Image: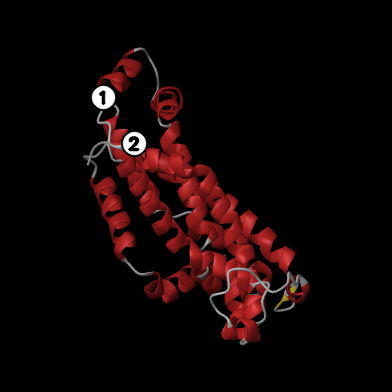
Amino acid sequence: MIHRPLWLRVIAYAIAILVSLFYLYPYWWMLLGAFRPAEAVLTDPLRLWPERLDFSVFRDIATVGGVSIWRYLANSVWITGASTILSVGITALGAYALTRRPDLLAFKALRSGFLLTMMYPYMLLVIPVYIVMFKIGLLGTYAGIILFLALGPIQFFLFEQFFRSIPGEVIEAAIIDGASEWQVLRLVVMPVAMPVVATVTIITFLLNWAQWFPILVISRSPDTYTLPVALLNMTGELGVNFQGIMALAAITTIPATLVFLLAQRRVMQGMADGAVKG
C-alpha cells in the first residue's frame, strides 16, 4: 500500500470538497429559492441564506391544477414502486433466459431490441406509445403508465452481464443434482445476484421517479400525474411564481436525493459487479 504525504492528502481532500461544493451549490440555491421571493433572488442571487424562513409558499402549492399535492405524491410512490418491482422481475427473468439460451433467434432479436431502445430518444415515442396504449385499452390508466415504465434496457444489461460472470459449472452441477431451471434461478443464481438486484432496484427507482414525459403522454387527466409532471404543469400554470416552482422542485427531488445518498455505495458496487464481463 502506497503511503502518500499528509500534505498531499490534505490538498486532495480540499480539492474534492471544493468540487463537491461547486456541484451542490445549484441544489442549495434551489432550496433557498423555496423560501425567498423572486424579487429577493433577482436583487441578491448569490445569497447563501434566506432573509427569513417563509413557509407560506407550501400552502400556495397545496393544490396544483385542481389536484392535491398529496395526490401527486401518492401517485409518484405508487407508480414508481410498482414499476420498479415489475421492471426488476421482468428484466431479471429475461436476462437469465437470454444467458442460458443465447443461441435462440428470438432472444438475439430481443437483445437487439433492448439496444435499440437505449439509443431511441423518448420524444420519438410519443405517437407509437399513444397508439399502443389506446389499442390495448390502457390509455389514461395507472396500469399503462406502470407497464411502460417497467421497460428497462439498462437494468436488463446489468443483469445479463452479471449472469454471464457466474461459472457455468455451478449451474450444470445444480441441474445434474435434479434442479429445474426455476430452482436454479431461485436457489442458486438469485442469492448470488442480490447485490446486483439491489443496485438495479435503486437505479430503476431513481429513473422512474424522475420520469414525466411518458406519464404526460399516457395520462388523460391530472389524477394520474406524478410530482415531476405536476412541476411541469405548475411551470405553465403559474409562470412567474418562482418561489412556488422552487418549492415544488425541492419536494420532488428530496426523496430521490435521500435514496441515492443512502444507497450510493451499493449502486457503485453493483455497477462494478454487473460489468465483470463484457
**Relative to residue 26, is residue 100 depicted above or below?**
above
Residue at the image point whose x is 39% and y is 43% from the top: 268
In this view of the protein, which residue sits in the foreground, 171 or 207?
A: 207
Q: Is residue 95 left or right of residue 52?
A: left
Observer able to see residue 237: no
Question: What count of labels does the image hold?
Answer: 2
Could you say which disc has been placed on residue 273 in the image? 2
| Mark 2–mark 1 distance (CA, rounded to whole Å) | 17 Å
In the rendered image, residue 168, in percent from the top left (x then y), is placed at 26, 24
In this view of the protein, which residue sits in the foreground, 237 or 26?
A: 26
Crowdedness near tag 1: few (<14), some (14–19) or many (≥20) residues, C-alpha within 10 Å: few
In this view of the protein, which residue sits in the foreground, 157 or 246?
A: 246
Q: Find numbered disc 1 in the image and state the secondary structure of the residue it sits on.
A: helix
Q: Amino acid at mark 2?
A: Asp
In the rendered image, residue 91, in percent from the top left (x then y), is placed at 41, 45
Q: Which residue was labeled with disc 1? A: 168
In the rendered image, residue 195, in percent from the top left (x then y), is placed at 43, 34
Observer able to see residue 232: yes
Choose top left, top right, bottom left or bottom right for residue 53. Answer: bottom right
In the rendered image, residue 128, in percent from the top left (x then y), is placed at 41, 72
Q: Find numbered disc 2 in the image and state the secondary structure of the residue it sits on.
A: helix
